[in-house]
Image (spheres, helix red, strand yellow):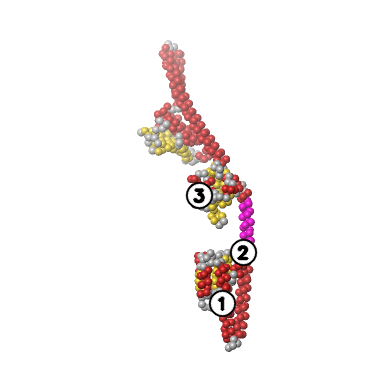
């Protein structure tokens, strides 16, 4: 059962409504709702079809869309009122309420009422029922008047009944008019409220535009997806060096991105995520000069269409500082590598000089002492002194050899495996720790610098184990395979926190990592307190190993 007034008192036959709209999809929802309420729906899609259907079908009500492009709403309404066959059919105009003049023009053209688009079904149904009821009432009055004229001579008594019915109908019309006046007052209030909202929105937009125009952040709005500039503030025009004359033409925002690959990446990010934040972009000004900018963008609406809102921040000075810093770091690393090489060369030279020159002198001195002792056989005291001198020379020779080995072990000249074997043997003799060396893949073919660097890293790692780890066992593993060389030093000592060690500027660990970087490798340290330490060196390797 419907709640709309008049349904219970209407005729049994279904009431007919003619819906006039050139785009049926716009009114399909209204037609469906009317059909559910029991109305018979007729459709017309142009002015001629409206007039023909109204004359032939005599509907109880016409819903006329004044904004339809194939229907001249006001002219069609006037022609319906001038035609004697359709002049009494009520017309409800549907239009976008822009101002009171357009609504007054619709009423002047003959529309009985109007509803604003988008149409509210409840309001529309109330007006439909009201006007259908008025139309039916008008029909009944006209029919009764004809009957009274024809039967006045025969049935004068009907006049009294007619007067009663007429009074009752007038009351109903008055009630309907009161309801209509109430609805109109509510509609007028809504229209006034909408006008106030529009005025406040315009004022807010004006304030926002003034803030953006005078703000310190370069901003613009570009169309989507073509990227044409729709709005720019003064700071952006100053940053990109765009003049007012150029803005009158077509300027594309993506043309200011200097790197095409980066531009395509940013466009894909915007399309996929709808926004991007703090993206560093290399830009090109209108005069061709380039600079770096940090861009923030999002997809939003502008004048009812999707657009890209972009904010830029010039970071050229920061990028130059970063490039200078990176260049300085690289120079420092090159200097460190050079000094490291010089230091190793000096150690090698010193070891050779000590081994050759001082070693030969001490050997000659030892031979001379031996000859002197042979000649002093008759003097026991002199012989004893000669023996003491010989022992002293032999100790000095051993010390010279040890110093030469400390500077640069001779085993380094025979490859990495020999150097590691010498280092493990010396450490095993020196420390109360069990050392084990495992070689997988044979002797790697390396340059002298690579062998020296790997040897020094392992030497530093074993020194740290001996001083700080309190370990009982250390495993050194060299794995040579196609594409990479891995050297691992693992102990079962007390372990430590690498992050805390780096925060205290552990120069030994930093030096090991920097040495690995010099030969194109990486150094990783895995350790936890109480769980031992693993130092792993990974070096890309393209050479062949010798078995």
Q: Position of residue 377 (x, y in %)?
A: 42, 12
- The span shown in magenta is 196-211
The dot on residue 99 is 2
Secondary structure under badge 1? helix
Q: Nearer the viewer, mark 2 or mark 1?
A: 2
Q: Which dot marks residue 433?
A: none
Q: Main secondary structure of the magenta part?
A: helix
Quarter of the C terminus within the rendering: top left
Q: Which sits in the foreground, 75 or 35?
A: 75
Residue at x-position 62% and y-position 78%: 170
Mark 1 — residue?
136
The answer to whether one can see residue 185 in this image is: yes
Q: Residues within 10 Å of mark 1 (few under 14, many from 20)?
A: some
Q: Was residue 205 drawn as part of the magenta stretch in this picture?
A: yes
Foreground of the two, 39 or 377:
39
Residue that carries the numbered disc 3 in the rendered image: 267
The residue under the point 59% across, 84% down is 149
| Camera-nearest residue between 291 and 256 | 256
Q: Earlier in the sequence, mark 3 or mark 2?
A: 2
Q: Is 13 inside the magenta-drawn segment?
A: no
Q: Residues within 10 Å of mark 3 (few under 14, many from 20)?
A: some
Spatial CA distance of label 3 from label 1 is 63 Å
Residue 158 percent location from the top left of the image: 59, 86
- Which one is nearer the viewer's eye here, 266 or 452? 266
Secondary structure state at the residue bearing disc 2: loop
- Crowd tier of the residue under label 2, counting other residues whose Cα lies within 10 Å: few below 14, some 14–19, many 20 or above: few
State which quadrant residue 199 falls in.
bottom right
CA gap, disc 2 and disc 1: 32 Å
């Amino acid at each position: 059962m419907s709640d709309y007034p008049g349904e219970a008192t209407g005729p049994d036959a279904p009431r007919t409504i003619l819906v006039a709209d050139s785009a049926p999809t716009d009114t399909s929802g209204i037609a469906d709702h009317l059909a559910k309420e029991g109305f018979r729906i007729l459709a017309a899609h142009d002015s001629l079809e409206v007039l023909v259907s109204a004359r032939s079908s005599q509907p109880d009500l016409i819903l006329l869309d004044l904004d339809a492009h194939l229907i001249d709403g006001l002219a069609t309404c006037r022609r319906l009122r001038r035609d004697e066959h359709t002049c009494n059919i009520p017309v409800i105009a549907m239009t976008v309420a822009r101002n009171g003049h357009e609504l007054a023009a619709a009423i002047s053209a003959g529309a009985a009422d109007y509803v604003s688009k988008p149409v509210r079904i409840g309001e529309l149904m109330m007006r439909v029922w009201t006007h259908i009821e008025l139309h039916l009432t008008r029909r009944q009055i006209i029919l009764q008047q004809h009957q009274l004229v024809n039967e006045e001579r025969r049935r004068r008594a009907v006049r009294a009944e007619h007067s009663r019915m007429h009074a009752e109908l007038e009351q109903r019309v008055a009630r309907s008019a009161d309801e209509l006046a109430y609805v109109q007052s509510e509609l007028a209030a809504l229209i006034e409220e909408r006008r106030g909202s529009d005025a406040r929105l315009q004022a807010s937009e004006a304030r926002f535009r003034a803030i953006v125009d005078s703000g310190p952040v370069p901003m613009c709005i570009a169309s989507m997806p073509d990227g044409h500039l729709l709005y720019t503030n003064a700071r952006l025009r100053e940053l990109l060096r765009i003049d007012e004359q150029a803005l009158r033409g077509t300027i594309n925002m993506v043309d200011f991105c200097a790197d095409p690959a980066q531009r395509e990446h940013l466009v894909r990010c915007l399309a996929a995520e709808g926004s991007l934040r703090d993206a560093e972009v290399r830009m090109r000004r209108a005069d061709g000069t380039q600079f770096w900018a940090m861009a923030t963008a999002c997809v939003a609406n502008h004048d009812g269409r999707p657009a890209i809102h972009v904010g830029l921040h010039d970071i050229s000075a920061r990028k130059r500082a970063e490039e200078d810093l990176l260049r300085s770091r690289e120079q420092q690393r090159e200097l460190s590598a050079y000094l490291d090489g010089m230091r190793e060369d000096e150690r090698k030279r010193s070891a050779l000089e000590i081994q050759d020159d001082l070693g030969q002198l001490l050997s000659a001195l030892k031979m001379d002492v031996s000859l002197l002792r042979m000649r002093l056989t008759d003097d026991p005291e002199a012989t004893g002194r000669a023996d003491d001198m010989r022992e002293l020379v032999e100790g000095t020779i051993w010390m010279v050899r040890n110093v030469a080995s400390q500077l640069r072990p001779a085993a380094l000249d025979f490859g990495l495996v020999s150097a590691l074997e010498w280092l493990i043997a010396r450490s095993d003799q020196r420390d109360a720790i069990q050392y084990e060396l495992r070689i997988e893949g044979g002797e790697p073919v390396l340059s002298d610098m690579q062998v020296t660097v790997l040897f020094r890293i392992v030497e530093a790692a074993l020194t740290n184990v001996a001083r700080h780890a309190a370990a009982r066992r250390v495993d050194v593993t060299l794995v040579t395979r196609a594409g990479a060389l891995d050297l691992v030093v693992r102990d079962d000592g007390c372990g430590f926190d690498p992050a805390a060690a780096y925060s205290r500027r552990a120069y030994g660990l930093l030096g090991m990592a920097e040495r690995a970087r010099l030969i194109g490798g990486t150094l990783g340290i895995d350790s936890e307190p109480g769980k031992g330490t693993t130092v792993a060196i990974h070096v890309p390797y393209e050479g062949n190993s010798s078995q």
